[in-house]
Image (tube, rainbow, N blue to C red):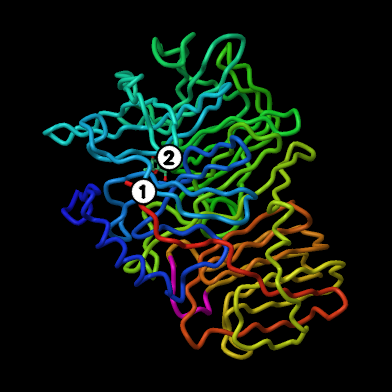
Amino acid sequence: MTDDKKRLIKKDDEKELKNIHSSIKNSVYRDYFHISPLTGLLNDPNGLFFKENKFHIFYQWYPFKGLHGLKHWYEVESFDLINFKNLGLFLKPDKIYKNRGAYSGSAFVENDEVYIVYSGNQKDENENRIPNTVLGKYENGKIIDEKVIITPNENYTDNQRDPRIYKKNGFYYLSLGARDKFDCGCILIYRSKNIEKDWAFFGQLEVKGFKNSAYMWECPDILNVCGKDVLLFSPQGMKSKGEFFNNIYQNGYIVGKLDIENKIFYSESDFIELDRGFDFYAAQSFDNTKNSYLIGWVGLPDTIYPNDKEFSGNLSLVRELKIKNNKLLINPVENISDLRVEKIEFNSLIKNIEPLEIYVENIENSFKIKIYSQEKNGGFIISFDKNKKEFKIDRSKLENEISKEFGHERKISKLDLKSMRIFVDKSTIEIFIDKGEYALTSKVFPKNKEKDLYIEGLDEKNTQIYKLKKSYLDNFSLNM
Ligand code: FRU
């Protein structure tokens, strides 16, 4: 780890971080309604839970630069899943068992207690990694009674991380994403009668009916959506296949039935990508909510973004999950419409756009929408070819390129497109198709002159455009 990635946050860093924050706060790439890092870099959503009318959201955070440095956790709160407020630093990697980062983890709410479980990433003097699993309790924005509950499993490689806890018939179970010694991605299961101690290795989860080609599974999460079990994970090493799996790493799910007492997940669907856009990873669901909500990182590992010098990464809109024919329906939370402040008059060319929503119904024709274009040219292009039944997003015409080795286009074919919602933020675009059939999330970094919206093939009667308000407060708060 280079020196600029190694900084642990200290009390007297507050002034410096405050300065960084005020310098990036007005960046042209600072989103209006997506959670962004206070400073530095944000990656995975962590520890999502709901308690006493409040949603708690955390993220992986390197405070000092837009780099994957020494990971801390930062907390954000929300009462409605659309307005967000920065709370403060939650975890720092200040102990030997996490000397190289407080890595990803989750929350488990039981009665009045909120447990936080995460990966303590440790390295010894010879740079050997020691993956620890750490448990503590959440109390007023701080972690208390923290201890290592699981030490490395010698029968696997040192890639064992991202814990999540489940309960069944008096037993607690804990899953970890892992890479075995034959370079196969998998999930390890631990079990205990007492959540705070006595965790023992229970075995590897067998995912029946799934042909695995990934070398590592990150961020596993098993949730129940409308009575069906859904196994969510972020596999690394899957080969791209036509229009599928074209990002550097994937994030997807399998619908089925979990029999945790026998360590089996019976697949009833293929592995399906959660999102068909360019940048979406490490999604996690909330604990202790009636509906199933999920948030992803709008970004990917091992990827450089054009604004990393200022800050890097953001979280996706909160998505509500339903299930239909063994496939998730993925929509932004219903009250997202509360972000609308003003209807914009329809025009084929709208100049100088600010964050907005484009809502289209009863689609009957082919169309092209160019977001952040220069007059009628360029931009992030969303198109639909009615004859070919092909939906595409293309970011090749934007001047700031991202990951061009992974292609500039993503496509959904065989689509009878009927409706669509597009959320355009300063540097994030999220598209939801046919009431949740597909979601496509992408980063964009338009230059100053790339600022118009051009629409071809859609008309006023089926298209509504709304200006959206700032709902991410972007206040400076460290609370150390
Ligand atoms: C996924 C991930 C996790 C890890 C964390 C470290 O993006 O690699 O597996 O815990 O990020 O920041």
Q: Is residue 316 magenta?
A: no
Q: Residue at x 54, y 72 (%)?
A: 395
Task: Judge: label 2 CB < 8 Å from ligand 1.
Answer: no
Q: Which residues are magenta?
A: 396-402
Around disc 1, counting alpha carbons within 10 Å, would you say few (fewer than 14), some (14 to 19), or many (20 or more)? some
Depth order, front residue of 102/181 = 102
Q: Earlier in the sequence, mark 1 or mark 2?
A: 2
At mark 1, the secondary structure is loop
Residue 178, position in %: x, y? 41, 30
Q: Is residue 401 magenta?
A: yes
Q: Residue at x 75, y 64 (%)?
A: 420
Q: Quadrant of residue 394?
A: bottom right
* Left or right: residue 466 compared with residue 113: right
Residue 82, position in %: x, y? 62, 55
Give the number of the disc on residue 141: 2
Name the dominant secondary structure of the magenta segment.
loop
**For residue 337, above or below residue 364:** above
Q: Residue at x 74, y 81 (%)?
A: 344
At mark 2, the secondary structure is loop
> What's under tag 2, amino acid-wise?
Gly
Residue 102, position in %: x, y? 33, 38
Around disc 2, counting alpha carbons within 10 Å, would you say few (fewer than 14), some (14 to 19), or many (20 or more)? some
Q: Which residue is mark 1?
A: 479
Q: Decide: marks 1, 2 in contact (CB < 8 A)? A: yes
> What's under tag 1, amino acid-wise?
Asn
Residue 225, position in %: x, y? 71, 34
